[in-house]
Image (spheres, rainbow, N blue to C red):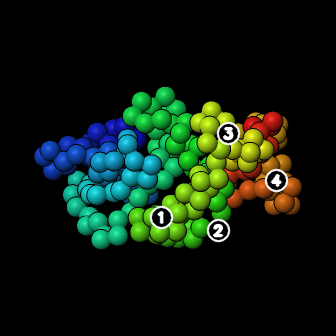
């Protein structure tokens, strides 16, 4: 990935600022995405996209009036990333996944997120204990983890975890292409 991205950078417009780099391995195009709130916002807004294709042609994509946002931004960085609190970002992902019943085809839009997801976050947070060091009762009982962590905690193979998910023995949710599993805190 490094050589392709470095080559593509040389084709960017002068002084173009970006926060996220996305490599499309199907066609070797590289997207440079300007997301100025990436380090400070929970769900940062995408404000500009420049795509450099494999032949070096540059295309500036127009962003829609209802902009796209990123969630699960901790997946974009290494665990030791210093730009934002990675653990807090993971926790936020677990919280909104636990809300359930979201229209996954629309949560990437800022208007939908703010109208239908954020209010539910606020409802959940209003029910939290007032002491900052005291976790919510729900958090004491379970938490959501990705496949690798679930396999490790439950000492299961990939195949066995899939069978337990499909049989309903373990509660799961699919987000994008990834499965998340609800584990009791004593196993997570």
How far is mark 2 from mark 3, CA to CA?
Answer: 24 Å
Q: Earlier in the sequence, mark 3 or mark 4?
A: 3
Q: Which residue is mark 2?
A: 101
Q: Earlier in the sequence, mark 2 or mark 3?
A: 2
Residue 149, numbered label: none
Kindly report which numbered mark, 4 or 2, lies closer to the viewer in this rendering. 2
Neighbourhood count class around disc 3 (C-alpha, 10 Å): few under 14, some 14–19, many 20 upward: few
Check the picture and name the quadrant holding the C terminus. Answer: top right
Going from N to C along the chain, the mark reached first, 4 or 1, is 1
Query: Is the residue under label 1 in contact with that under label 4 (CB below 8 Å)?
Result: no
CA distance for labels 2 and 1: 13 Å
CB atoms at circles 2 and 3 under 8 Å apart?
Answer: no
Indicate the position of residue 96 as horizontal and vertical percent values. 59, 55
Q: CA distance from mark 4 to mark 1?
A: 28 Å
The quadrant holding residue 187 is: top right
Mark 1 vs 3: CB contact within 8 A: no
Query: Are the residues flagged by discs 4 and 2 in contact, CB closer than 8 Å?
Result: no
Q: CA distance from mark 1 to mark 3?
A: 25 Å
Q: Considering only vertical position in the picture, is 153 above or below 73?
A: above
Q: Which residue is mark 3?
A: 135
Q: Mark number for residue 113?
A: 1
Residue 170, which numbered label?
4
Label 3 residue SS: loop
At x 22%, y 46%, the residue is 17
Q: Secondary structure at mark 1?
A: helix
Relative to 183, say whether 106 is above or below: below
Q: Is residue 156 left or right of residue 5?
A: right
Q: Is residue 85 left or right of residue 13?
A: right
């Amino acid at each position: 990935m490094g050589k392709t991205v470095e080559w593509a950078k040389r084709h960017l417009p002068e002084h173009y600022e970006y926060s996220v780099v996305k490599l499309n391995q199907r066609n070797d195009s590289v997207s440079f995405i300007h997301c100025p709130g990436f380090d400070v916002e929970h769900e940062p807004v995408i404000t500009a996209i420049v795509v450099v294709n494999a032949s070096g042609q540059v295309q500036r994509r127009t962003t829609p009036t209802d902009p796209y946002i990123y969630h699960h931004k901790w997946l974009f960085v290494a665990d030791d990333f210093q730009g934002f609190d990675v653990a807090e970002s993971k926790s936020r992902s677990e919280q909104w996944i636990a809300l359930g019943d979201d229209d996954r085809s629309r949560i990437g839009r800022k208007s939908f997120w703010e109208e239908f997801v954020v209010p539910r976050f606020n409802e959940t947070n209003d029910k939290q204990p007032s002491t900052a060091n005291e976790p919510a009762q729900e958090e004491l009982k379970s938490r959501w983890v990705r496949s690798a962590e679930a396999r490790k905690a439950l000492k299961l193979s990939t195949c066995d975890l899939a069978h337990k998910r499909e049989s309903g023995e373990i509660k799961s949710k699919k987000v994008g292409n990834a499965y998340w599993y609800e584990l009791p805190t004593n196993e997570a």
